[in-house]
Amino acid sequence: MTSSVSWHSHDPADIDVISLAKTLVRYDTSHNGEGADTLPMARTLREIWEQAGVESEIIATPKPGNVHFLARISGTGARPPILVLSHSDVVAVQRESWTRDPFAADIADDFLWGRGSLDMKGAGAAFSSALLRHVRAGAQFDRDIIYLADCDEEGGWHGTRWLVQEHWEKVKADAVITEGGWTLADGGDGTSPLIASMTCVDRAFGAIRLIATGTATHSSRPTDDMAIVRLAQAVTRIASSPMPVALTPLNREYFAAVAQRTASTALADAIGALLWADRAGDQPALDACGDAVIVASPYPWLHNAMLRATVAFVSQEGGKRANVIPRQASALLQIRFTPQGQSPDEVLSQLSGLLDGPGVRMEVVGPPGETAQQTLDRWRRDWNAVPAPTDTDVFQAWAKAVRAVYPGTMPIPAMFEAGTSGKPWQERGIPVYGIYPYAVDNATLTAMHGDDERVRISALRRGADLLYHMFGYFRTDAS
Ligand SMILES: [Zn+2]
């Protein structure tokens, strides 16, 4: 982009990204498993968008208060619409583990603190403020841009899957941009990040339950087949047997870019050895090199998730009273699969091989009404997902914006280690792209869905600027 483009000038009436992010974080939209109260926040969003002259609506779901918000910036129609998707609900907090009020939106130490500040109200504020800056400057886009703050992303039954079924005409688009790709600060404040990524495919996921049984009896006479012990042993065996490293073309490209950009020779060397072992088809070497990459990486858990299928232990049940040894204990495991990597069937067979002790079995867990076979078929379909193309104008606009806002940083396509509410579009063959528009360090990343969630203020400002550049390429007066 040339620097002479007139829309670079700042409009004092811009919606400031930080104050908007604070406003959004202050709404407690915690998902309780059955929905969240997103209506008050949707009303505020509606006021903000209507003040800028953009038509908007609140879409009620069968669950009172659990609503979607949608605004539509009308373009010339020269190009098909794109949809910008930013979920309005957040995961619940364990207040006693936080050092700050999770809904006060405190600003301290160059961070905005609060549940949702990172995932994804900060991103939502950046998307909105970037778009509204263009709108307020009188911009005309070459396409409609739909902004959707969806509900039930973190659980529930009336999320985007329900929305596309009930209101397809309102959310029909040629491409979707939502949460995903990370900008890795690599120890710095992110002004010159290691890489900036736009995700083109999400990991697939599914759940299994481990069920251990033993003798139910009086706790004064413990037996050698106690259900809780059997469960713990199975959990330990699985936790200490990571899935094999399985690289896909997308992940190879990603790690090669990290190796090229990192200042750490240890990390660059470990990735070099990893790619060599991959080319050689040497699985034991590949697994060993994967471990070396994780040790050398400033983002060990993110990179572990990009190297292999992962198993997370998320809840357990069993036993209620001190004087009773329970008959049964169970644990819920969430599995995330790399599309085109190790298949769900291979993962399940590795897991069942680890249950060779007596009294422990596993079952696949799906939503109510889905049979085990249907669940498995769904996992296989999700695992078959193909990355969205990078030769689209959305991907190219983002890459140009990265080069403008973070000079010297490499914009690269990537896999998202988590999932997004863009899935119903992806299933209809529509490309879904993901960006978290702020540079993050490993500690910030770990706080996502954890305690003391936060986002760096300077990174959020720069991210909003990047999005402003990106959307600028869709203006009719773009050069
Ligand atoms: Zn999210």
Image (cartoon, helix red, strand yellow):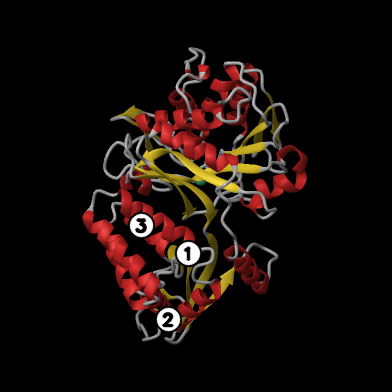
Residue tagged 2: 354
Asked if labels 3 and 1 touch by Cβ distance under 8 angstroms, the answer is no
* Quadrant in which residue 476 is drawn: top right
N-terminal of the pair, mark 2 or mark 1, is: 1
Compared to residue 263, the image places residue 248 above or below, namely below
Q: Amino acid at mark 1?
A: Thr
Residue 436 in picture, x, y percent from top left: 46, 41
Residue occupying image coordinates x 32% and y 54%: 259
Q: Find residue 458 and name its label.
A: none
N-terminal of the pair, mark 2 or mark 3, is: 3
Find numbered disc 3 in the image and state the secondary structure of the residue it sits on. helix
Compared to residue 323, the image places residue 179 above or below, namely above
Q: Nearer the viewer, residue 306 or 194?
A: 194
Q: Between tags 2 and 3, which lies in front?
A: 3
- Residue 267 in view (yes/no): yes
| Left or right of residue 114: residue 85 | right
Residue tagged 1: 248
Q: Find residue 301 and name its label.
A: 3
Q: Nearer the viewer, residue 455 or 219?
A: 455
| Mark 2 neighbour class, 10 Å CA radius: few under 14, some 14 to 19, many 20 or more | some
| Mark 3 neighbour class, 10 Å CA radius: few under 14, some 14 to 19, many 20 or more | some
Residue occupying image coordinates x 29% and y 45%: 186
